[in-house]
Image (cartoon, helix red, strand yellow):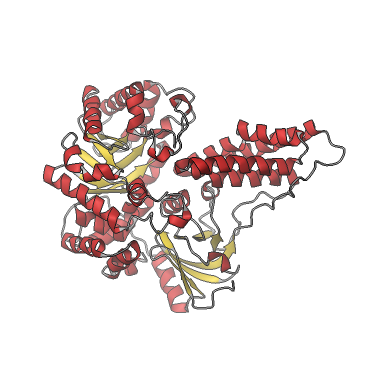
Amino acid sequence: MTAPPSGAVITGLGVSPGRAVGPVARMPEPVAEPPAGSPPTTGTDPTAQADRVRLAAVRVRDDLRQQATRAHGESRAVLDATALMAADPALLAAAQAKVIGGLSAARAVWEAAGEVAEQLAEVGGYLADRVHDVAGVRDRIIAELSGLPSPGIPLGSRPYVLVARDVAPAEMAILDTSGCVALVTAEGSPTSHTAILARALGVPAVVAVTRALDLSPGTVVLVDGAAGTVRVDPPVRDVTAAFQVSTRPHVFDGIGRMADGRRVELLANVADIAGVKPAVEANAEGVGLFRTECCFLGHTQPPSVDEQVSVYREVFRAFPGRKVVVRTLDAGADKPLPFLRLSAEENPALGVRGVRVAARRADLLTDQLTAIAAAAGAESADVWVMAPMVSTAAEATQFAAACSRAGLVNAGVMVEVPAAALTASTILQSVRFASIGTNDLAQYAMAADRLQSELAHLNDPWQPAVLRLVQLTCQAGAALERPVGVCGEAAADAALACVLVGFGAASLSMTPRALADVAAVLAATSYNDCVRLAELALAAPDARQARHAVRTELPVLGELGL
C-alpha cells in the first residue's frame, strides 16, 4: 500500500493524551527468521553450541537487569520480568535440546521461543501479553548469537515520532522521552502495557492505526494522542499551535475542584516504592491505588509480615494525613507467583485470582492485613483497604470481616466484574467504599481480551455498556452514602474524567503525569456540565461516537492540547 498523501489524517485509538510533531522513525524490523532446518556450523561441537545459547541468554538477561536499575515503577517491573524470561530454564532447555538434535543455535532459539509463545497465547489473559516479551527476548538472543546489534528502539538526539507494529513492554520501559516525542503503533489496545507505559511516561500515543506501517521514515506527522489521529505533513499553523501547547506549563496545585467549587479527589496510582516520588512531585492528594504485588514479586515464599510492614510504611510515610488506598494482593493463574501453587487453567482471566486466591490461602490475606494495620498504626496516613476481583456480596462481607479482625476500619472493594456493578447496591452494604477498575471491567463487559489488538475497538472504556456499569455503581454508592472512585486507566483521560464525575465518582486515581491535565479540565467544567456530558456519552451508539460527542462539548481540551 502506498504512503498516505500529504495532509491525510489516519486514525486509531488515542491512549495517551497530548500533541507532538516530528519526523517518523521506524522501529527496526524483528530479527529475520533463520532458515528452517539450518544445521550448526560445520565442525562445531553441538554441546559447545548449546552452551553458546546459554551464554547469550545470560548476557541478554544481564543487560536487561542493568537497564532495570535505571528505571522505576511499572518500567522496572517490566524489565525485571523480561530479564527473568531471557534466562527461563524451560526456554533454554528446549533450545539447547534442539541444538543437540542438529539445529543451529539461532534456529533452535527461534523454534523454542515459538513453542513458548504458542503456549502463552493459548492460555490467554495476562500471560498472552508475554508473547511480545518472548519475541523480544528471542530477537535479542539471536542477535547476540549472530553478532548483530541488539534490536530495539532507534536512538537519536533529534525529536522523532516512533512508528512500529507494536512495542514490547521491555522496549517501552527504556524509551528515551527526550528523543521520542510520540508513539504510533499498528497494533495495541487502550489497556495494553504499551498504552499504560506511554501514559506513565507522558508520551502522546495512538494505537491500532491501520495504516501506521505505510508511513515513510522522515515524514513529518502531527500526533494527537487524545483524539487518536495522525496528520501527515501538517500545516505550519497546526505545528505552531501544537508546539505552543506542549510548552505551556500547567501544574496541579494539590486540590481537585470543579468550576463551581465542587471537590473531586485527584489521586495517584502507585506500583511500588519508586512510584511514590512521581506521585508526591505531581501534588497528588493521596494514593487511590497502591498495588501491593511489589512485595510478592520475585519471592519463592510469601514475604514475612515484617518485610511487608517495611514497604507499606515507606509509602504511607510519604502521605501524612492523606488517603492511601491499598489493594490487597491481586495475583492468580493469570499473574502467577510460585508460592501460590495454583494449577494451570484454560482461561486464567476467569479463574482463581484476586480475592479468590484469598479464599484458598487465608493465611496470605491475614498476614497482609496484619502488616497493613501495623504500618498504618506507625504512620499518619489515612489508610483504606480494598479487595480485588470481588463478584458477590458474600465475598465483600468476608473481606470486611477480615479487615475488622485486623483493626482496619475502611474496608472496600474493587468493582472490576460486571456482576459487582450490577449488584453494587447489595455489595456496598458490607463495606465503606468502592473503586472501579475500568481496565478489567471493560474486558469482562465486552467479552474482549484486553490484550488482543483486533478487539481494541471493543475493549474501550468509552463503550456505552461499560459506562452504564460505572453509572450503576456510582448510583448505588450515592444511595448508600458510600464513596465510589475510579482507579482504572479511564481516569487519566481528561474528557472521560468529566463523564465519570458526572456519574457521581468522588475520586479519580491515575498515573501521576495525568494529574495536571485532568485537574485543569475539571477546573474549567461545572458539575452540571459533567452530568450533561455523561448523558451524552450514554446516549451514543458506540465508543467512538461517545468520545466524539463529549470532546466536541469541551473546548478547553483544545486550549490545553488534550
Along the horizontal axis of the image, is 541 left or right of 219?
left
Query: Compared with residue 350, is residue 19 higher up or lower down, i.e. above or below?
Result: below
Residue 143 in view (yes/no): yes
Q: Position of residue 562 (x, y in %)?
A: 36, 64
Q: The N terminus lies in which quarter of the figure?
A: bottom right
Return the x and y of residue 243 as percentages of the image width and height: 44, 69
Residue 140 in percent (x, y) is at 65, 45
- Snapshot quadrant of residue 40: top right
**Residue 251 showing in the rendered view:** no
Q: How many marks are shown on the rendered structure?
A: 0
Observer-nearest of 98 and 562: 98
Report the residue at 55% width, 40% height from top. Answer: 119
Spot the residue most to the front.
346
Residue 482 lies, with reference to residue 167, above or below; the image says: above
- Where residue 157 appears, x then y in whole percent? 59, 60
Q: Name the residue: 42% across, 53% down.
A: 199
Q: Residue at x 36, y 21 (%)?
A: 305
For the residue pair 354 and 193, the one nearer the viewer reads as 354
Picture layout, residue 403 above or below residue 40: above
Q: Answer with the quarter of the image where residue 361 lies.
A: top left
Q: Which is nearer the eye, 524 or 248?
A: 524
Residue lying at the far right of the rendered structure: 43
